[in-house]
Amino acid sequence: MVLYMVITGLTLCLAGLVKNTCNGAGTVSTGNAGNRGNSADGLYERSCITRQNAVNYASMMIIFTILFLLSAFRLDVGNDYGTYVDTFHEIYVGGYVVTEPFFNGLIKVLFFLSGGEDYLLAFALFGFVTIWLFLKVLYEQSDDFFLAFFLFMTLGLYFRTFNTIRYYFVLAVTLYSFRYVLRREYLKFLALIGFAAMFHKSVLVVIPLYLLAGLTWKKWHVAALGAGGISLLLFRDFFLKIALLLYPSYENTIYVENIEGITGSLFNIARCVAVLVLALLVYKEAVEKHEANLFYFKLNLLAIFVYVCCSFLPLVTRFGYYLMTSHILFLPSLSGQIRDPRKKKLVTAAILLAGIIYFAYFLKTGNQVGVRVLPYISWLFEERYFPNAGEIF
């Protein structure tokens, strides 16, 4: 726990050196579709050779190195670490696995190049790509890198990448895909999500959800969404059967037998409702005429819809996370759009306080089943175990 607190504090100090804009000729902000014309053009960074730019890249490189090494050096940290080791072994020997073919092929190639079942290398590879992609998103698509990175760490998102490595990789991809939805480059969006689906097919659910959030909602859209929610609640058994047809690997498993329902998502619902209340308080100045924030606002509404109306689906949290992870971009942008200095300080302080409280709760529950990111164990100080070492796996 102390290690995670130190890592978080150190990287936040470095993040404070990073600025989303470089003051100089021919420069644009790396932020999202903010107050620079309320378009998605700000999603793209142009080269800018300045002292601040050099500080940005140096700080980002150190942050990435720290986070990557912590991820790569872990051993049996993560709720499904052992399950993935077994999966890697089955892929290597040609056994039956439910993971996607592209993922399986990547593991085979990796093990072929390494000369054996080097699962530590596999975890390190996914940690490298996932962390790099998250940082790229925060740097290029946030209005305030420090605040976005603060939420990335204190909401436990970074530490959760130790779990379900395929899922958190595609989650980072979905955040990156926001730029294409906002710019209405739908073919690029579909191609990127199609690529991600070759690692975790659950990501396909974001195609209708993100496209819906990108539309200008009319009254009939809201009415149709409400009717859909009611039908999901009334005919949940029917829709569960359809879901299991699309995802047969969950049939007759504990994920279906032990569905917690809406009670298992109350914490996430409360978080989404809190974000909704904050957004409504500053809606006129920070959301209504701000394209990206309006998109994030709709994603938050859809997250509440999914958690409430689709609570009968196995692992509904995964679908909700595709929507609510946008908070790490939405909240900094909301704060940045407020013109009243006093109100802006209050909102920023509220976000910081909520993040600190959430982080304390996350660390307290970090050793529980379903999280298991604590205690942290490194193979640097432990005997290196392989799949046939039954002592751990």
Image (cartoon, rainbow, N blue to C red):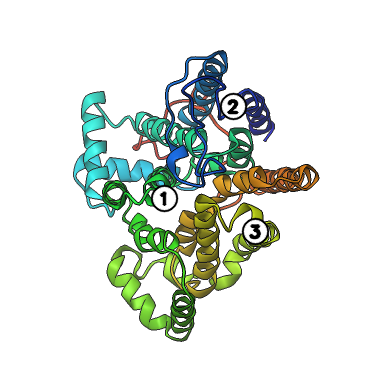
Q: Position of residue 103 (x, y in %)?
A: 27, 43
Determine whether, in the image, residue 322 is placed left or right of residue 100. Answer: right
Residue 228 is tagged as none
Query: Which of the 4 image quadrants contains residue 255?
Result: bottom left
Residue at horizontal 40 percent and vertical 40 percent from the top: 390
Query: Is 393 in front, or is 328?
Result: 328
* Disc 3 to disc 1: CB gap under 8 Å: no
Residue farthest toward the bottom in the current orientation of the protein: 234
The mark nearer the N terminus, 3 or 1, is 1
Quarter of the picture holding the C terminus: top left
Determine whether, in the image, residue 259 is placed left or right of residue 199. Answer: right
Quarter of the picture holding the N terminus: top right
Query: Is 348 in front, or is 149?
Result: 348
Task: Decide: is 313 above or below 40.
Answer: below
**Amino acid type of the residue tagged 3 in the rendering:** Lys
Identify the secondary structure beneath mark 1. helix
**Amino acid type of the residue tagged 2 in the rendering:** Lys
Query: Which of the 4 image quadrants contains residue 133?
Result: top left
Residue at horizontal 33 percent and vertical 58 percent from the top: 204
Query: Is 304 in front, or is 31?
Result: 31
- Answer few, some or many: residues within 10 Å of disc 2's Cα (few below 14, many 20 plus, some between 14 and 19): some
Q: Residue under label 3, please give it.
A: 284
Identify the secondary structure beneath mark 3. helix
Q: Residue under label 1, please give it.
A: 182
Quote the CA–CA distance across marks 1 and 2: 23 Å
Q: Residue under label 2, please give it.
A: 19
Q: Position of residue 147 (x, y in %)?
A: 64, 38
Query: Is 16 in front, or is 365?
Result: 16
